[in-house]
Image (cartoon, grey):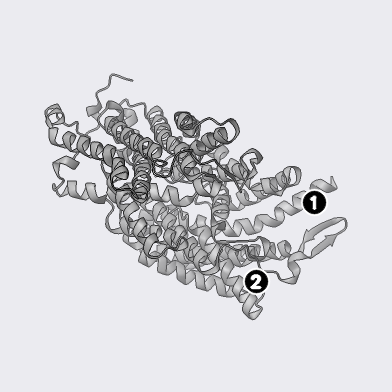
Amino acid sequence: MTNHPPKAVDSVKIPPSKKFMGNKSRSIFAILIFLILLLFPLTQFIFGGMNYWLHLLLYAFMYIAMASSWNIIGGYTGYVSLGHNVFFTAGAYIAGLLWVYQGISPFIIAPFGGLIAFLIGLVFGLITLRTSGSAFIISSIALTSLAAILLDKWELAGGANGLSLNLIDLPLNTAKFPFYYAFLLLAALTVFVSYRIKHSKFGLGLRAISQDDVKAEVAGIPTNNYKILAFAISGLFIGIAGSLWVYYLTYLRPGLFLALGISANLVLMSLIGGKGTVVGPVIGAVIMIAINEFFVSQLGSSAMNIVAIGVLLILVLLFFPEGIIGTLKSNKKLPKILDWE
Amino acid sequence: MEQFLQILILGLSLGGVYALMSSGLTLIFGVMRIVNLAHASFIVVAAYISYWAFKLIGMDPILSVIITFPIMFLVGLLVYKLIFAKVIESSRFVEITVLLTFALSLIIEGLLNYFFTGIYRSTTPIYCTECLYFGNLYFPEGQFYATIVSVIILLGLFLFLRYTRLGNAIRATTQNRTAAKTVGVNVDRISMLTFGIGTGLAGASGSLVSFLFTFYPAKHMDWGTIILALIVLGGMGSLFGSLVGSFILSVIAAFVSYYFGPTWSPITFYSALFIILLIRPQGLFGKKMELSR
């Protein structure tokens, strides 16, 4: 780190520390939600038959974690990546293969899955973050294509057909519990890290980079290192999510993890909620999961599902580019409990 | 030596088609700085049009260029008018347009999947399995014709850009948008027409690849990455560059395919993309920093 004051970048403001510490209501709100979600699975013992809701919630937690994670490079830093499904796949393959061949529980492997994703992020960040704008987006797509062709050839992992994994050995009414809590913790951790990054010197540097790369560099921000680190961190949590999700899904197949729809979802969730905000991806993920669930339950068609994602993405880009949090904030109507910026 | 020549011929015989596939993308990027991720999806759509024209009325896929070009030209105009005209002034133009075209490619893939399912298809005119012999060397007949047609279309494109008023206006806009506006070029109209022509070229190449490769709705991922590699190698926005890039990479891919097996040949393009970005981000003929903003 250098000693240059970050205030050299004029359009970025540091929130005054008084508001920063004194804002109790939103902390209470967040802790309350977390506690409710922590206790929610107990309803299984009281009412029974809550598996559907547990599934939906843990699915939402996963996407909250992934969208928040994507937001670190795509939102804070302004480098849109369409290749984040590669991190998801990396985590899934590490955990899946070790579970199938060595019998090590994916819950233990998950952090390592994240670490591998982090390392992949470092290596590819080193190459691709020399570029910016459209070249970066192109390279992120090439990363996906490269991964796809390698996985199709990987005999040990079953190639394009993949492998199937053993189910977790638990009775039906508690089988979802470990996943529920793992994804809940992951989501909480990711959002917390995302929040801390946003309010750190590092995060300030990232925001400066998103506004003007060159000015940020001149202001003394080590832009290259920052960008690569942000890219790798944003891969970390998605890798962990992949490791957990493969165990939950019990299938390890390139098409399930390296899907374009996953990358598209991450972008769309962040955009709907508000790219570059802390709460935006969380809200975006919840809304998208709800919409998706509605469409699947009403129409049930999976081919048209991706069409809906595409149409929604176009509509948001054209008419609602700032997202929910961004729009509320520019109109000064953002409720205090959602204002974590 | 003979073997070497044979592989070289096989490589070169696909170069022309690759050049045609990427020409529209280059043209659109040159004029508008839009990286059109839906370009390959348009190629797939045109391939389906050729497929059904062949299947239903027995139309030769090469001949169907005369219907796919105008159809895709109109599609291009429509897409431009509906989507891109709205964001032309946006401050986050690059990011928004890339995501818009990405969304477009998802929509096209989903619709094709819905209507035609994921079955692998290709048109099968008689010549697609025949070979032409020159001494001991052979030339797959389909690729031979496809190359000739591609070269004719590219030559037509070159003459159009070089010798017509509209073509000059397009080149002027490519070189400097503001300056072109200053000397009285209607830049918005040129942008729309270029998008149409570029998409039309995707259409024409779609007819040709319909009998060279098998295709399915998600095929745009493969083709898309390949043509992106071609234009990044050539230097984005440079038509000549994408032409040279196409021939270089298709020859290398032919050698990779010969020595490591045909399923590995796409990896040539993907890794080329990374290598170029690493050592020469502006490509062979691009201006420095062309790509950044």
- Where in the figure is residue A141, as x and y percent of width and height? 50, 46
Callout 1 crowding tier (Cα within 10 Å): few <14, some 14–19, many ≥20 = some
* Residue under numbered circle 1: B6
On screen, residue B61 versus residue A178, left or right, reads right
Circle 1 or circle 2, nearest the eye: 2
For mark 2, give the secondary structure: loop
Q: Is residue A143 above or below residue B153?
A: above
Tally of marks: 2
For mark 1, give the secondary structure: helix
Question: On the same chain: label 1 and label 2?
Answer: yes
On screen, residue B134 versus residue B33, left or right, reads right
The subunit carrying tag 1 is B
Picture disc at residue B61: 2
Residue A151 showing in the rendered view: yes
| Image quadrant occupied by the C terminus of chain B | top left
Amino acid at circle 1: Gln
Q: Is residue B285 above or below residue B68?
A: above
Question: Which residue occupies 62% across, 45% down?
Answer: A152
- Where in the figure is residue B282, as x and y percent of width and height? 50, 41
On screen, residue A189 versus residue A249, left or right, reads left
- Where in the figure is residue A301, as x and y percent of width and height? 44, 63
> How many angstroms separate mark 1 from mark 2 (CA)?
26 Å
Q: Is residue A204 above or below residue A327?
A: above
Image quadrant in which you'd find residue A188:
top left
Amino acid at circle 2: Pro
- Where in the figure is residue A187, as x and y percent of width and height? 33, 37
Question: Which residue occupies 47% across, 54% down?
Answer: B37
Instruction: For the residues labelled 1 and 2, say whether their Cβ atoms are less than 8 Å apart.
Output: no
